[in-house]
Image (spheres, coloured by chain):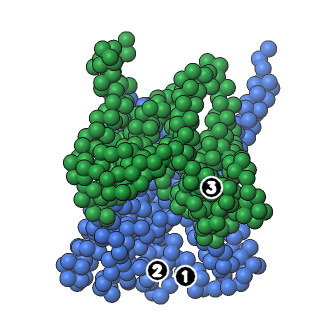
Chain colours: A green, B blue
């Protein structure tokens, strides 16, 4: 414990986020004492589920020096196409749903990979283009309408729970079995980023792509695998979202890229690349989720909420960027 | 530049075959009314891209300016004087939004993409807080004149404004000291700093002008619809990025011509009207914008690589032929 409580550790970026989350929880708990209960933990975990998966993929991409704003569109495309396909051909297999959705995500990820790794198009513009392609395509295919009929065995998964908690007023909160997915992905990302050469390559490319190339990393191959793997995981996250929401909506994930990128940056990942951690990202997502879900408890009226969330994001990202700048300018002996 | 002219003519010719209703005078007139709204936004985006950054908050700033103008006009009576006051207030709001962006990017050195993404959210949220949700209506009739009136029955005021702004920006970029400093800073910020250029001033001025242009566009939108809402023109961000990229501005910064961007704005207006005439779904438009963006970027990348290869071959041949043995 003594080795943990050093000044350097206590002022790390991730610890700052922990302090802010603690302060925010105290504020919310002061207004609404029902906040400090297991039910809240379960509900927050449920809201965070899909966002954490998106944030992990986005974190890996931002660490490598790129950015990806196309993941909501890819997710909408994958989940709607999978459900529509399964309904049309009367396929009712859980494995097929995950494989097909992951495969579609992989294809879109491959498009991103080709544009960014092969044609060297700036990542923001390339993924903006992919986003329009995917969202335009799925809106044309779906006509803007959602599907509410999910194949039965797939739908049954949404009713599998790990455990339930009933609070004082009789409201039951159940923790869905899908919580295992982001948990497993967190461990996987942590292992790959910290303990494999592929992960080292991601950090190296983010730091300086030319230096990484000269040092011997295969930049093209690393970026390709990264964007395609991100696409695959996004496809899986998409079908999870559809199962949990129990419908296939072609456009309700759009617009979430802002929140996810903000969560990743607040969690300590520098937007310029080369730095980032899984713990920080999860904490960032927790902070953003707590803020968006509980502003109403702090008596912030509905129409102020967009501004309030934006303000918190600006302050959070300014703090991290200022720290990064100070570290970059300080003497490194 | 010639290529863009060719594309514009090509589109007109194709549409003439596909559906002659495209060539009607009223179609061209309605295009001239619509084009300046996102055309002026693209000029703002162009300036920011030349400086090496990007501005994704233009639509948010435009909507906020429109909302502030509407509030000022409604609360000071609705006379022509108050319309002038509202316009001035909108331009001021645009400048402040731009200065906010510029300060965060220039002084705190936060990457432009992040700042403008968050800034756009902030401006939209502020607009939503002011309107509390629904659109602000009840504006005086004179406000509709700007976007819907014409000079001599032929040239819409909005188009005249577009042309004037294009000329002013062209002069600014080519002949003023600021314009030169902007291009230099966009090419290489470190070199420009060592050359004595105040990067912070150039950045602040660039984003302030871009904010003012967004405010002008906001006023045009207000005048067009006769009401102010916090989420008009949400698709204009991608559209202005597409126009700027098609107009030959390098995303890395340092190069850009106003005439090309203006022409590419016209081209995209032609395409947009063509879709309306052919009665395509508006979702198809989103898909096609994305496709165009990808195709144009890939084409530029391939052409650039081929140009380098071609120049290298010429250089090698020259050296081979002029070998002093």
Q: Position of residue B205 (x, y in %)?
A: 33, 50
The residues bearing labels 3 and 1 have C-alpha atoms spaced at a distance of 57 Å
Instruction: Tell me: B220 left or right of A151.
Output: left
Residue B156: mark: 2
Q: Residue at x 29, y 75 (%)?
A: B70
Q: Position of residue A224 (x, y in %)?
A: 67, 36
- Residue B260 visible here: no
> Which residue is situated farthest in the top direction here?
A333
The residues bearing labels 1 and 2 have C-alpha atoms spaced at a distance of 8 Å
The residues bearing labels 3 and 2 have C-alpha atoms spaced at a distance of 60 Å
Q: Residue at x 61, y 18 (%)?
A: A215
Residue at mark 3? A156
Determine the secondary structure under disc 2.
strand
Determine the secondary structure under disc 1.
helix
Chain letter for mark 1: B
Above or below for B203 versus B12: above
Q: Quadrant of residue B301?
A: top right
Determine the secondary structure under disc 3.
helix
Residue at mark 1? B29
Mark 3 and 1 residues: CB-CB less than 8 Å, in contact?
no
Above or below for B323 versus A134: above
Total marks placed? 3
Q: Residue at x 49, y 59 (%)?
A: B237
Q: Position of residue B118 (x, y in %)?
A: 39, 50
- Foreground mark, 3 or 1, reads 3
Chain letter for mark 3: A
Q: Quadrant of residue B87?
A: bottom left
Chain letter for mark 2: B
Mark 1 and 2 residues: CB-CB less than 8 Å, in contact?
yes
| Of callouts 1 and 2, the N-terminal one | 1
Q: Nearest the camera: A162 or A239?
A: A162
């Amino acid at each position: 414990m003594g080795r943990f409580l050093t000044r350097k550790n206590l002022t790390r970026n991730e610890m700052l986020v922990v302090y802010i989350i603690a302060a925010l929880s105290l504020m919310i708990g002061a207004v609404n004492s029902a906040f400090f209960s297991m039910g809240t933990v379960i509900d927050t975990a449920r809201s965070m589920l899909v966002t954490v998966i998106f944030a992990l993929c986005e974190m890996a991409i931002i660490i490598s020096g790129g950015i990806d704003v196309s993941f909501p569109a890819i997710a909408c495309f994958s989940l709607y196409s999978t459900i529509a396909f399964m309904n049309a051909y009367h396929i009712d297999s859980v494995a097929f749903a995950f494989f097909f959705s992951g495969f579609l995500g992989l294809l879109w990820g491959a498009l991103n990979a080709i544009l960014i790794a092969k044609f060297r198009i700036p990542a923001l513009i390339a993924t903006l283009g992919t986003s329009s392609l995917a969202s335009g395509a799925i809106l044309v295919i779906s006509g803007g309408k959602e599907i509410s009929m999910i194949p039965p065995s797939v739908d049954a998964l949404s009713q599998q729970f790990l455990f339930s908690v009933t609070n004082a007023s009789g409201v039951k909160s159940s923790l869905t079995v899908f919580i295992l997915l982001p948990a497993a992905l967190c461990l996987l990302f942590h292992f790959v980023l910290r303990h494999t050469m592929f992960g080292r390559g991601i950090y190296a490319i983010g730091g300086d792509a030319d230096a990484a190339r000269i040092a011997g990393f295969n930049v093209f191959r690393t970026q390709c695998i990264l964007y395609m793997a991100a696409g695959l995981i996004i496809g899986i996250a998409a079908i999870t979202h559809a199962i949990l929401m129990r419908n296939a909506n072609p456009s309700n994930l759009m617009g979430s890229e802002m929140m996810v990128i903000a969560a990743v940056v607040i969690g300590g990942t520098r937007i310029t690349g080369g730095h980032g951690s899984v713990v920080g990202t999860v904490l960032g997502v927790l902070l953003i989720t707590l803020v968006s879900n509980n502003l109403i408890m702090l008596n912030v009226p509905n129409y102020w909420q967009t501004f309030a969330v934006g303000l918190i994001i600006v302050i959070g990202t300014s703090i991290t960027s200022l720290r990064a700048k100070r570290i970059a300018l300080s003497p490194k002996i | 530049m010639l290529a863009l002219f060719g594309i514009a003519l090509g589109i007109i010719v194709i549409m003439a075959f596909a559906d002659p209703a495209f060539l009607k005078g009223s179609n061209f007139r309605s295009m001239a009314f619509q084009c300046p709204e996102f055309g002026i936004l693209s000029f703002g985006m162009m300036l920011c891209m030349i400086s090496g950054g990007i501005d994704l908050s233009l639509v948010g700033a435009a909507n906020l300016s429109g909302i502030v103008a509407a509030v000022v006009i409604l609360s000071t009576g609705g006379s022509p004087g108050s319309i002038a006051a509202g316009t001035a207030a909108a331009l001021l709001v645009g400048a402040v939004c731009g200065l906010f962006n510029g300060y965060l990017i220039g002084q705190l050195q936060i990457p432009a993409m992040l700042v403008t993404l968050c800034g756009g959210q902030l401006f939209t949220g502020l607009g939503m807080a002011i309107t509390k949700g629904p659109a602000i209506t009840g504006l005086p009739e004179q406000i509709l004149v700007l976007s819907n009136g014409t000079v001599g029955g032929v040239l819409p005021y909005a188009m005249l404004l577009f042309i004037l702004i294009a000329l002013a920006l062209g002069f600014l970029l080519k002949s003023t000291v600021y314009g030169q400093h902007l291009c230099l800073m966009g090419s290489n910020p470190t070199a420009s700093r060592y050359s004595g250029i105040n990067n912070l001033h150039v950045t602040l001025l660039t984003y302030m002008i871009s904010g003012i242009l967004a405010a002008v566009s906001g006023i045009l939108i207000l005048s067009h619809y006769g009401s102010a809402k916090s989420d008009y023109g949400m698709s204009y961000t991608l559209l202005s990025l597409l126009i700027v990229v098609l107009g030959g501005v390098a995303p890395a910064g340092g190069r850009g011509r106003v005439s090309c961007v203006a022409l590419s704005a016209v081209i995209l207006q032609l395409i947009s009207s063509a879709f309306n005439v052919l009665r395509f779904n508006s979702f198809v438009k989103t898909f096609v914008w994305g496709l165009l963006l990808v195709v144009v970027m890939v084409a530029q990348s391939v052409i650039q690589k081929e140009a380098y290869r071609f120049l290298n071959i010429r250089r090698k041949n020259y050296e081979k032929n002029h070998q002093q043995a």
